[in-house]
Amino acid sequence: MHGKPHDFSVKWIYWFGWMTFGAAFRSLFGLRVEGMEHLVTEGPVLVAANHQSFLDPPLISFLYQDEMWFLARKTLFTKLTRWLYTRWNAIPVDQDRPDLTSLKTIVRKLRDGQRVLVFPEGERTHDGEIGEAEPGIGLLAIRGGAVIQPVRISGAHEALPRGSSRVRFARIRVDIGPPIRLTPEELKAPNGKEDYDRLAKRIMAAIAAL
């Protein structure tokens, strides 16, 4: 696995959480990773994964062993948890009344050379199956101009399904796909909802194919 040197003095709580979850994924869930040769470790990356469980963000962060940003429901940012989620690089998003604030934040992070994790489906799966992508992932990919890294997660739904607070011992597997690099023509072409939707479906198809 790769990554830049960790600045423990600045983000110690981030790396503590990363190491804790990493140990759990290895020992409790027998984490298996395929396709590490495809992992993009340099420059801005828009990591697109199917959403199975609350375990998904730390699971993907563990792959890179480097800082990553991700979206989290605004309701998770309570008085007690806001401090922690902020230091875990979570970006709040209001799923009931979505606006452009979180999208603009992601685009800015990508343009600054950061790595951002998004879930194209927009919510966790109910049955473990891969759903349809929202057009927003297409907008982020074009506006952010970053390499797109498709990732498929299996087993996390069985380990911690939606609606449950009880962790089950299930085998988790992560498949990393070849990166999608948009051409200059694709990035410069007139963009609209149809273009964003077409790209979103392309990204979701790449995830489902893994």
Image (tube, helix red, strand yellow):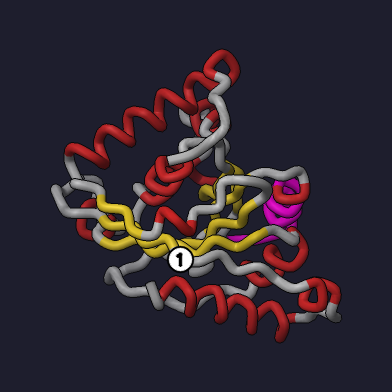
Residue extent of the magenta highlight: 96-109
Mark 1 is surrounded, within 10 Å at the Cα level, by few (under 14), some (14 to 19) or many (20 or more) other residues, namely: many
In this rendering, position of residue 108 left or right of residue 15: right
In this view, 139 is above or below 77? below
Where residue 55 sits: x, y (%)?
A: 35, 47
Residue at the extreme top of the image, as rendered = 9
Quickly name the residue at label 1: 177
Q: Residue at x 39, y 64 (%)?
A: 152
In this rendering, position of residue 189 left or right of residue 33: right
Residue at the extreme front of the image, as rendered = 37
Of 106 and 123, nearer the camera is 106
- Asked whether the viewer can see residue 52, the reply is no
Q: State which quarter of the image contains the C terminus.
A: bottom left
Of 146 and 116, nearer the camera is 146
The main secondary structure of the magenta stretch is helix
Count how many numbered circles sit on residues in the image: 1
Q: Residue at x 48, y 59 (%)?
A: 38
- Asked whether the viewer can see residue 84, the reply is yes
Q: Residue at x 19, y 46 (%)?
A: 30
In magenta segment, residue 175: no
Where residue 182 sits: x, y (%)?
A: 70, 71
- Residue 17: quarter of image: top left
Where residue 116 sits: x, y (%)?
A: 60, 49
Give SS at disc 1.
Answer: loop
Three-letter amino acid code of the residue under disc 1 = Gly
Where residue 140 sits: x, y (%)?
A: 69, 63
In this rendering, position of residue 167 left or right of residue 19: left
Of 103 and 1, nearer the camera is 1
Q: Residue at x 55, y 74 (%)?
A: 203
Q: State which quarter of the image contains the N terminus.
A: top left
In this view, 9 is above or below 126? above
- Residue 167: quarter of image: top left
